Amino acid sequence: MATLSKFSEDMMGNILSRLPPKSLMRFRCVLKSWHDLIDKPSFVDQHLSTSMDNKVTSSTYILLKHNVLTDPSIKDDEKAVRATLFNPDSNQRDILLSSLNLGSLVDDGLEIENHVVPPPMRGYALSLEISGSCDGLICLNTFNSEDIVLCNPALEEYRVLPKSCILLPPRVPRQFEENEDDDYYEEDDDDEIESNPKCVGFGYDPNSKDYKVVRAAQFVSGVFTQHPSKVEVYSLAADTWREIPVDIQPHGSLNPSYQMYFKGFFYWIAYWTEERNVILSFDMSEEVFHDIALPESGPDAYEYTSIAVWKDSLVLLTYPVENEAPKTLDLWVLDEDLKGAKGLWTKHLAIGPLEKGVEAPLVFWKDEELLMVTTKGDVVNYSLDTQKLKHVPRHGLGEPTNIQAVPYVNSIVSIKPGNKIESI
């Protein structure tokens, strides 16, 4: 009987592991045995593995961060916000996360599921960014605040991370006493040190089987005085920040197209202290930084550089800023055996020339399919096979620099203890 029961549980686990997260959350309420099975860490791993190994869907889901027009008179009313998310007569922008099944573009359709941004991150329409996507979890942060939020959109869960252990309290301006409205700093305040977050990254440590967030901060006083940077790492398992020693001074880019997590490393296009930029990588297991030199014959001749994953390799996309003529993107491949350290690049192919108005690449969702954004804020898909563009329908609008797309998978990886987001 025990053998039959065990076989039945294995068979049921195999069936349930193929279902989407929202269906599984409903099935947890059907039978206690199903509830217990779905909550098992082994089943969570099985469901994630099944989702990522599914050749039909795993490589076609993308999470898109973009702006929508909302009614400015509505505040903190979830139901009212949902009713006015796509109000074309409004002049106020808000943020929306949309999971897109781009595989449905083949049939001239598009499966879209919209997700409300967690409450702590609302109100940052122009500065919110996704600082990493891994196993269905995403990291949201804004450089207008030290708040960082981990979120599982499929489960509608979010978790606000604890206060930083390295950032200093904000500097508060003092007021003149004699009817002066302007803020000012006294001369003695010039020596006061301020902290500024420079780069944030989220990913998975395969050695400790833990999800981590790394944040680097720059410290300055006066106008030109810089102090050594500090770095802290957050562990989801421990729910704490801790400072780590660093032997380089990281200066991450603020452009979300210039950062990503891939195979145990987080990568940024970094503003370097010397003559040119580099790729900065952080090893989630060893908790050390490496710098990767850019191709000597490539990006110095370009104004824009992006990083992406193509055919399971880290790649660099370089392209000119001018829009007067059709752009051509050069794709460079990093030697994958170097595991995030200094490496060699090979120019593999040129993409284009593209139609006028294409602004920048967003993400590869298949080996031959590249999602891009136009100067008008539209999202288009470019096929490397046919060399043709196809419009990707979506709600909302926004500047090209405020649109971000990351690889995504529907998972039941939980970030508890946390909070529930009311779904759309």
Image: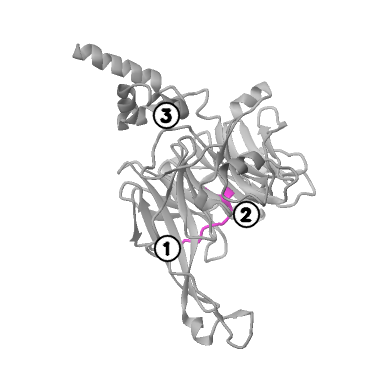
- Examine the image and state in which quarter residue 243 appears: bottom left
What range of the chain is rendered magenta? 249-259
Q: Position of residue 398 (x, y in %)?
A: 68, 47
Query: Nearer the N terminus, badge 3 or badge 2?
Result: 3
Magenta highlight: main SS: loop
Is the C terminus in the top left, top right, bottom left or bottom right quadrant?
top right
Q: Which residue is mark 3?
A: 25
> Which structural element holds mark 1?
loop
Q: Which residue is mark 1?
A: 248
Callout 2 crowding tier (Cα within 10 Å): few <14, some 14–19, many ≥20? some
Considering every residue shown, the one lying at the far right of the view is 324
Query: Nearer the N terminus, badge 1 or badge 2?
Result: 2
Work out how far the residue at label 1 is from the one at label 3, CA to CA, in angstroms.
Answer: 45 Å
User: Image height check: is 19 above or below 167?
Assistant: above
User: Image height check: is 315 above or below 271?
Assistant: above
Mark 3 is on which residue type? Answer: Met
Viewer-nearest of labels 1 and 2? 2
Q: Position of residue 220 (x, y in %)?
A: 49, 73
Question: In percent of the image, x 27 and y 14: which residue is there?
Answer: 7
Residue 60 or 289: which is nearer the viewer?
60
Residue 289 or 257: which is nearer the viewer?
257
Viewer-nearest of labels 1 and 3? 3
Work out how far the residue at label 1 is from the one at label 2, CA to CA, in angstroms.
Answer: 30 Å
Callout 3 crowding tier (Cα within 10 Å): few <14, some 14–19, many ≥20? some
Viewer-nearest of labels 3 and 2? 3
Q: Is residue 168 located in the magenta-colored stretch of the structure?
A: no
Q: Which residue is mark 2?
A: 126
